[in-house]
Amino acid sequence: MNLHQLSSSSVMALIIAATLASGANLFPSLAQSQLTPAEKSRQSFQPVYQLRGHIWDVASLALSQDGQILVSGSFDQTIKVWNLNTKKQLATLDGHQDGVNAVAISPDGQILVTAGGTAQANTDNSIKLWNLNTRKLLGTLQGHSQGITSLAIAPDGQTLVSASYDKTIKLWNLNTKKLLATLQGHSSRVSSIAISPDGQQLASGSGEVDTTNNIINLWNLKTSKLLRTLTAHSGAISFLAFSPDGETLVSGADPSVKIWNANTGELQRTLNLSSIGGISAIAISPDGQTLVSGALDTSVKLWNLSTGTLLKTLVQPPSNNQNFDRLTPSSIAFSPDGKILIIGHGGEAALSNFPIDIWRISF
């Protein structure tokens, strides 16, 4: 997960400043589900403001179900809690000894789970549980032998899933903090996981550079049984996401995004992003119609998930691709109501500030 600059131009800065000065409402009253097809075609994305506080890549984002609380995890070893209504930072959580790769919030908004680390044997391989309201540490889970790459919580709030560099996936009871099962079916690091909206399926992706171990495993989350293995990517599968209806699975691996039938495992289409440096983040809109992709060339693109058609390039890459001081989108998330798009940043240069951009979706 690398980062660069969403926009380094003074024009972008003036737009953000003007929007802040106007006191624009971040939360339009009209829900996405109320829009007609014609209205949806006129949707626009406007940068509203930035959250600043991380001094290294913003690797992961999570939002509470009410869309008010944002949590960001960073390679700077901290977790930050933000209030999107007030645009204020509520807290900085310390406790991890390596970069934080993953954050997740329980469906009831009570528990925050954080984890990180690397492939090194002496890395911080702990999973920490926090009370999101009080920001107090509730406990620490130990079980992985290397760092954790990804976290997911089942819709019922009972099961926590963690993926690791150690090639395993672990299932935990979030309430009792007990290890339920260890899934072994990957021969290289497990880079990404996702749970279907009905809580029945778990998808896990793995791979390394220049190997044949780039696979997606689909598991029955209740029985821990392997259902099928998908093989089509030429690179490590770094991103996975289910559509809100659970019918579609999206996987990202340089240099392409693939769209699968989640029930049959059939490959439906491939999106070749043709971005210099590859994919850095993906997200699916809450209405299931739009896929957002971020790339290391700083671009952010919107795609029709059903057809694979490119709708628009939200952020254009700079003309000078040799500028290594730029920021790139490293994490992307939608608010639960689909009215806000959040983009965290990272970078390859020794920068001092890695912002989180808040975009308003309107029509």
Image (tube, rainbow, N blue to C red):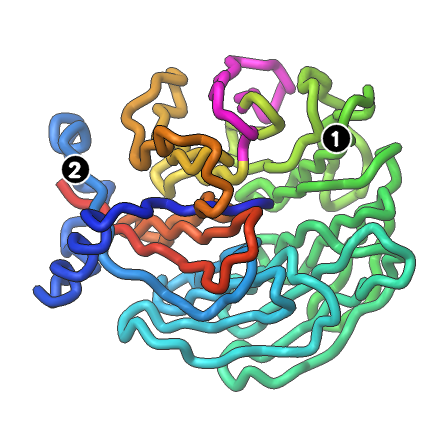
- Is any part of residue 2 visible from this angle? yes
Using the rendered view, name the quadrant where residue 38 is placed.
top left
Dividing the image into 4 quarters, which one contains the C terminus?
Answer: top left
Using the rendered view, name the quadrant where residue 300 is placed.
top left
Looking at the rendered structure, the kind of residue marked 2 is Leu
Q: Position of residue 274 (x, y in %)?
A: 48, 19
Q: Position of residue 191 (x, y in %)?
A: 71, 41
Residue 340 — which label?
none
Q: Is 259 contained in the magenta span? A: yes
| SS class, disc 1 | strand
Question: Would residue 293 be found to the left or right of residue 24 on screen?
Answer: right
Q: Is residue 237 above or below residue 212?
A: below
Residue shown at the point (45%, 70%) measured from the top left = 53
Q: Which residue is mark 1?
A: 217
Residue shown at the point (51%, 13%) measured from the top left = 269
Dividing the image into 4 quarters, which one contains the N terminus?
Answer: top right
Q: Mark 1 or mark 2: which comes first in sequence?
A: 2
- Is any part of residue 290 visible from this angle? no
Per the model, the C-alpha gap separating discs 1 and 2 is: 36 Å
Q: Position of residue 335 (x, y in %)?
A: 36, 54
Q: Please give the range of residues in magenta.
A: 257-279
Using the rendered view, name the quadrant where residue 205 is placed.
top right
- Mark 1 nearby-residue class (10 Å; few <14, some 14–19, many ≥20): some
Q: Which residue is mark 2?
A: 35
Question: Would residue 123 be found to the left or right of residue 60 on screen?
Answer: right
Q: Is 236 contained in the magenta span? A: no
Looking at the rendered structure, the kind of residue marked 1 is Asn
